[in-house]
Image: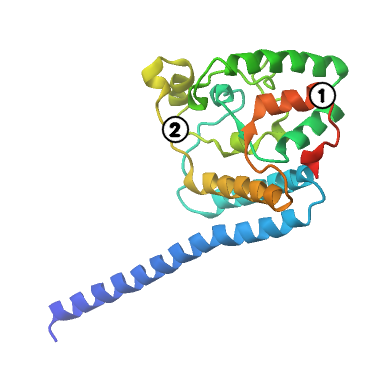
């Protein structure tokens, strides 16, 4: 065998071995999401209420998302920062349990005056949202933003809010506040992070369906307004 043959053989073995490792890593990456869903479903099935399930989901997501970002090389850059609230003007849908959890948090932590002011803002936002024919065209300030453009329920924020990430704050601002052409711009999401949140959303929907309850997502502003305005403590959706 010539030196050239030896070199080709070494290169070929290296490529083949690296390819096999890459295939195995890809398989394990996919399995990671499947395992996350299995563990999440098992945890949610043990939850007494959908609100409890939503809280458990948020806790598991927070841990999994942070580990995903810390454990893999070359994470996607994020421009998301404190008081960067362009995405807080987009339409937000919530799966079962989330509204109940947030409403309970508000009742436990907001004063009566703060709750009444929130209700006023929710009514205004609901009216603004109803002026749009498509949810992806909605541009309405979230009633839960405070005067400093910070989320007043950040630790309990909906899954949709947690899922959204962006590498370009300027693009987000243009999409929300720019002209109609800019508003259709797509914001690329961190794929692994986003996928975890899709799995979690579907898990809550399926849990509700298994319990004979409504499994579809609802618009957050209208759902929270209804929950707070009617003073529902333990309605059927919490079963």
Q: Position of residue 56 (x, y in %)?
A: 74, 48
* Frontmost residue, 124 versus 63: 124
**CA neighbours of label 1 inside 10 A, class few (<14), some (14 to 19), many (20+):** few
Q: Residue 148: which quarter of the image?
A: top right
Q: In the image, is residue 75 above or below residue 35? A: above
Question: Which residue is located at x 58 percent, y 18 percent?
Answer: 129
Residue 63 against residue 186 in the figure, above or below: below
At label 2, counting other C-alpha atoms closer than 10 Å, the crowd grade (few under 14, some 14-19, many 20 or more) is some
Q: In the rendered image, which quarter is residue 121 located in?
A: top right
- Please tell me whether mark 1 sits on a helix, a strand or a loop: loop
- Residue 230 disc label: 1
The residue labelled by disc 2 is 187
Which element type, helix, strand or loop, lies under badge 2? loop
Q: Position of residue 46 (x, y in %)?
A: 78, 57
Residue 178 percent across, percent down from the top left? 43, 15
Answer with mark 1 or mark 2, whichever residue precedes in sequence.
Answer: 2
Q: Give the residue at x 48% y 42%.
A: 190
Q: Is residue 66 visible?
A: no
Residue at image position (60%, 18%) is 141
Name the outermost residue toward the front.
212
Q: Give the side of residue 79 with respect to residue 40, left or right.
A: left
């Amino acid at each position: 065998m010539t030196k050239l043959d030896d070199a080709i053989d070494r290169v070929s073995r290296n490529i083949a071995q690296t390819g096999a490792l890459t295939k195995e890593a890809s398989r394990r990456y996919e399995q990671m999401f499947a395992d996350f869903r299995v563990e999440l479903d098992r945890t949610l099935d043990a939850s007494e209420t959908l609100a409890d399930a939503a809280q458990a989901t948020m806790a598991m997501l927070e841990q999994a998302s942070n580990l995903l970002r810390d454990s893999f090389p070359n994470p996607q850059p994020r421009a998301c920062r404190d008081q960067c609230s362009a995405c807080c003007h987009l339409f937000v849908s919530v799966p079962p349990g989330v509204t109940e959890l947030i409403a309970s948090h508000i009742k436990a932590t907001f004063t009566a005056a703060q709750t009444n002011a929130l209700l006023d803002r929710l009514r205004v936002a609901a009216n603004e949202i109803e002026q749009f024919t498509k949810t992806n065209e909605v541009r309405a300030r979230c009633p839960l933003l405070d005067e400093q453009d910070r989320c007043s329920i950040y630790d309990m924020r909906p899954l949709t809010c947690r899922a959204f990430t962006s590498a370009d704050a300027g693009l987000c601002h243009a999409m929300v506040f720019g002209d109609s052409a800019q508003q259709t711009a797509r914001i690329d999401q961190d794929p692994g992070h986003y996928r975890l949140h899709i799995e979690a959303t579907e898990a809550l929907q399926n849990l509700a369906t298994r319990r004979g309850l409504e499994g579809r997502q609802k618009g957050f502003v209208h759902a929270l307004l209804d929950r707070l305005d009617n003073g529902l403590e333990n309605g059927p959706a919490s079963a």
